[in-house]
Image (cartoon, rainbow, N blue to C red):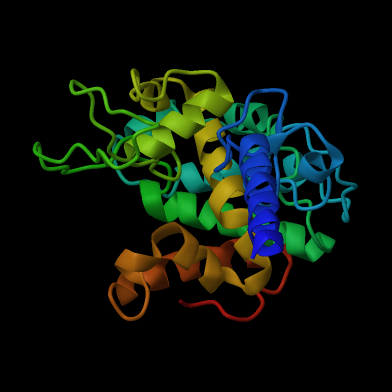
Amino acid sequence: MVALSLQKGLLTLVIVGILAVNVKGACNCAANECCSKFDFCGTTAEHCGEGCKSGPCTTTTTNDVSVPDIVTEGFFNGILNQAQGDCPGKSFYTRAAFLDALNSYNQFAKSGSSDDGKREIAAFFAHATHETGSLCYIEERDVPTTENYCDTTKTQYPCNPSKRYFGRGPLQLTWNYNYGAAGNENQFDGLGSPETVANDANISFKTALWYWMTNVHQSVSQGFGATIRAINGPVECDGKEPGKVQSRIQYYQQYCTQFGVAPGDNLSC
């Protein structure tokens, strides 16, 4: 019994030590830290090496895809031109802002083969096109005045009672915990000034790429359907919103065709 108690005590110390090292989980990292594949922050090879999601990752890229060469002015403006009417996004979203944001997330579209990288770019812009009406909308429309998207259980990201955390930006960033974490990583006050995502195009794209690299990037290899599930699965997947799912798929297939790459399997969720 004494030996068993000692073993339990040692195990507890080890667990406590691990938790102490990884207290900044869920990728709420400082600017000089990497977000590891297990969602912990740090600067070691384990954090910045294989599977690193964001920050100054050191992983050797496995393809030679040049995102700026794929996301050309013509491609970007082609999305904007699909928007109907006088849209606020037409004078807000720019290719230059996207490329500026890309500098903070250099592992985007760099996993797998060159075709895999092109499919990831197609997937990102398919979701952005769907979420914003072809980059037409900067903010979510028709949000009930009673809905602030504040999850009070996420105590590390306390809501400002005078702010609302509804969807903003290319991937419609939503909820206080996403604004808080995205703000911490991209040096803006996400909780105190969530409207920054709708006022600063560079920050807007940074939050979209932050969300993608934190929550979606790891699903890309499983097919486009897995990325739908990662973004809005509980609302749209499993037959709940088939029209919205099909909209995302159609944009994805369209962009894959433009990039000269097969869309792959598992398109739906």
In front of the other: 195 or 45: 45
In front of the other: 50 or 107: 50
The residue at the point 30 percent across, 65 percent down is: 235
In front of the other: 134 or 26: 26
Looking at the picture, how far across and down is residue 173, in whole percent? 40, 40
Q: Quadrant of residue 149?
A: top left
The residue at the point 9 percent across, 39 percent down is: 146
Q: Quadrant of residue 16?
A: top right
Q: Quadrant of residue 155?
A: top left
- Is residue 258 something that shows in the picture? no
Q: Is residue 187 left or right of residue 110?
A: left
The residue at the point 48 percent across, 26 percent down is: 183
Q: Is residue 1 left or right of residue 173?
A: right
Looking at the picture, how far across and down is residue 187, in whole percent? 54, 18
Q: Quadrant of the N terminus?
A: bottom right
Looking at the picture, how far across and down is residue 142, in whole percent? 16, 44
132 shown above or below 63: above
Looking at the picture, how far across and down is residue 193, in whole percent? 35, 19
Q: How many marks?
A: 0
Q: Is residue 138 left or right of residue 8?
A: left
The residue at the point 37 percent across, 27 percent down is: 198
3 shown above or below 197: below
- Is residue 16 something that shows in the picture? yes
Name the residue furthest front: 2
